[in-house]
Amino acid sequence: MGQGIKRKLDVYETEKTPQNQRQSIVDISVCKLQVNKSVKKVEPSLLRSVLILNTLKHIESELRKEGHCAPTNTTAMDIPEVNPNSTVIDFLPDQPIQVSNDSNSATEQFGPLPSIDTFVGNRSVSSEKITMETSSFPVITESSLTTIYPTTLRIDDIFNDLEFNIADYDIFSSVGNNKLTPLSADEVLHSCPNSSSPFGSDSFATLSNASLSPFCKSESAFEDLDNIMQILVGS
Amino acid sequence: MISPTKEKGSTFGSKQLHKIQSMLHHRPRAGSWGSKEKTDKHLQNNHGNGGEIQWCFSQVKGTIEEDITEADIISCVEFNHNGELLATGDKGGRVVIFQRDGKGNKSFHTHGEYNVYSTFQSHEPEFDYLKSLEIEEKINKIRWLQRSNPANFLLSTNDKTIKLWKVTERDKRAEGYNLKDDSGILRDPTSITSLRIPLLKPMELLVEASPRRIFANAHTYHINSISVNSDQETYLSADDLRINLWHLEVTNQSFNIVDIKPANMEELTEVITAAEFHPTECNLFVYSSSKGTIRLCDMRERALCDKHAKLFEEPEDPTNRSFFSEIISSISDVKFSHNGRYMVTRDYLSVKVWDLQMDSKPIETFQVHEYLRSKLCSLYENDCIFDKFECAWSGNDRHIMTGSYNNFFRMFDRESKKDVTLEASRENVKPKTVLKPRKVCSGGKRKKEEISVDCLDFNRKILHSAWHPQENILAVAATNNLYLFASKD
């Protein structure tokens, strides 16, 4: 008894309920909007982005009608496009990540959907818009640093001072190779380490966190990056 | 110039004037310029079997290799106005023009064979330094101009730039110059004792393509369509949010005739997906949108055609509502019929024929691959739901064809209401063998010869195809191969 193969919940069975299907569509959509633009160096298709966004909006309005959500802050959902090849460093905002499974989210929350500008067209990166939820950290190059700080900062100096475990940042190698593998719905659903609530919550914020979490494997890594940025910004 | 007919003893009276006036107002029909032969050919194919066409394999162009080079993927196919030339564009920015050889070997090819006529590099990849992005060299569309002189002209476009190419033939060479010898080296002046007149000697046919105009920097977004006006002097180019009108002679300016960009990009919900000029009315054009609507605009009404003259939209079927309803309603192609009375639109699952006089609903709807409706979620996941399929009219406007997956393409007969699924494959490449109809089964019992939906190859899709303007010849692009099919007769 009990020696048999462990039974694994068949993923496809869970997707049959409209709730779960809706959720997986949202997950897939969020992934689509984020991942692709770091992989290709070509401007993403506006048609595709608009259609995905409209699908998300449709689901959002459906959920709203069913009484699930209240509009929240924009930053939770702002997905700015960041070009991995850009030579501008993105600054962290003063506030940390909006993880809505904290205090006040007994209700599921959605942010208003991001402006289409964030995906295409408007490529000017402004510091207010950037949050830690960007999926692709820019490759910090030596030249980019010197353009921002033309004084004596060199990338070696910065990194020498810190316990900086590169291994925690899968993103760097993958961005460097320009090969971000698209996340399947599975990975997104099951990869959020920080979320204490069961993944039944339909929060966009947790979703965007979840979709980004493979890139942020540990909290200490966040603190390290925080430190780096404070050094860069503060000094 | 039109001159009045001279009758013996007649004066230039009002009757003559009326005749001239009606000639001046008569719009030339597409395809009638310069062509001397009567286009009765399309009638010949309709005898006997009541107009139903039996399709046979004719030719296939391209490599057999399994490994597909991305640059070889064909991205557009277009016949010229008499069907003698067939142009294809690929992802590598090249244009290949095929020319139809004479009737040739009767037993092998009744319709004549297409062979390579000219190949040239139309567009190169560019880099937008401002946005730090690449501009692909992929040819999105090719449109031919009608011939008015021995040269052929075509417009080709990538995402940002349109180019007018002149394709000329040279089959004679002058020999016997005085100052230079035949290899081009200057002759010693002291050795020239008499003058001679250079003679034109025949040479091997040389086809040259040269860019005559470059229309650039007019589109912020990706160009999805170009369409030449029936006046053969102007053309439109459409990107996701704007449509511009150009004059072929003027490259440094264009008129913006449609602009649907909202003041606040956050409010953007709809983009332009295709646009085309009416084949005979030079003031009318249509454009389709990602929400499944088509707008007919009249350029005479106002300079900025934001306000449509007609809006074609079919009310949504509530029974088929799903999360993906909007995505699958997005129109990927719109084409006017040759007679200008109808247009056909292609959305993800169907083709619809619209009567220009009726904007409330299409007059005909044909399902292309309804068996995909239950698979929309997976197709959304693998991005196939965003594939843009084109559609084409037959020369007599009776048939419509469009592509599908697994290298299948669908043919619809508007009169008999019959449809057939055919496959572009290298199996059975014997010419004059009638193609076997294919069938897809969506579930349950799979009959012999049928293919199940789950076995379809979604990487082999037929997005681009063209129908000869007069005869029943089809050019179908299957990834990196170009197939030519012809009717049996």
Image (cartoon, coloured by chain):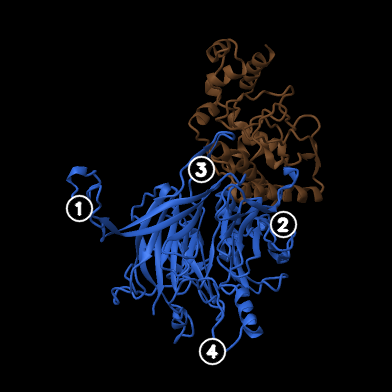
Chain colours: A brown, B blue
Q: Amino acid at mark 3?
A: Ile
> In this rendering, is residue B190 above or below A149?
below
Q: Amino acid at mark 4?
A: Lys
Residue at left 24%, top 50%? B178
Q: Quadrant of the C terminus of chain B?
A: bottom left
Q: Amino acid at mark 2?
A: Ala
Look at the numbered discs 3 and 1 and tell me whether their residues touch, using CB distance below 8 Å: no
Kindly identify which residue carries mark 4.
B8
Left or right, B381 with reference to A204 = left
On the question of residue B420 being in view, the answer is: yes
Q: Nearer the viewer, mark 1 or mark 2?
A: 1
Residue at left 19%, top 43%? B190
Kindly identify which residue carries mark 3.
A5
Q: Judging from the image, what secondary structure is the residue with disc 2 in? A: loop
Q: Chain of mark 4?
A: B
Q: CA distance from mark 4 to mark 1?
A: 55 Å
Q: CA distance from mark 3 to mark 1?
A: 102 Å
Q: Judging from the image, what secondary structure is the residue with disc 3 in? A: loop
Do marks 2 and 4 share a chain?
A: yes
Can you give x and y, in whole percent of width and height, for residue B78 in the image? Answer: 47, 62
Q: Nearer the viewer, mark 3 or mark 4?
A: 4
Q: Chain of mark 3?
A: A
Kindly identify which residue carries mark 2.
B303
Q: Nearer the viewer, mark 2 or mark 4?
A: 4
Q: Earlier in the sequence, mark 1 or mark 2?
A: 1
Q: Chain of mark 1?
A: B
Kindly identify which residue carries mark 1.
B194
Q: CA distance from mark 3 to mark 4?
A: 105 Å
Identify the image quadrant of residue B130.
top right
The local crowd at label 4, few if under 14, some if 14 to 19, many if 20 or more residues have their Cα within 10 Å, is few
> In this rendering, is residue B406 above or below A184?
below
Do marks 3 and 4 share a chain?
A: no
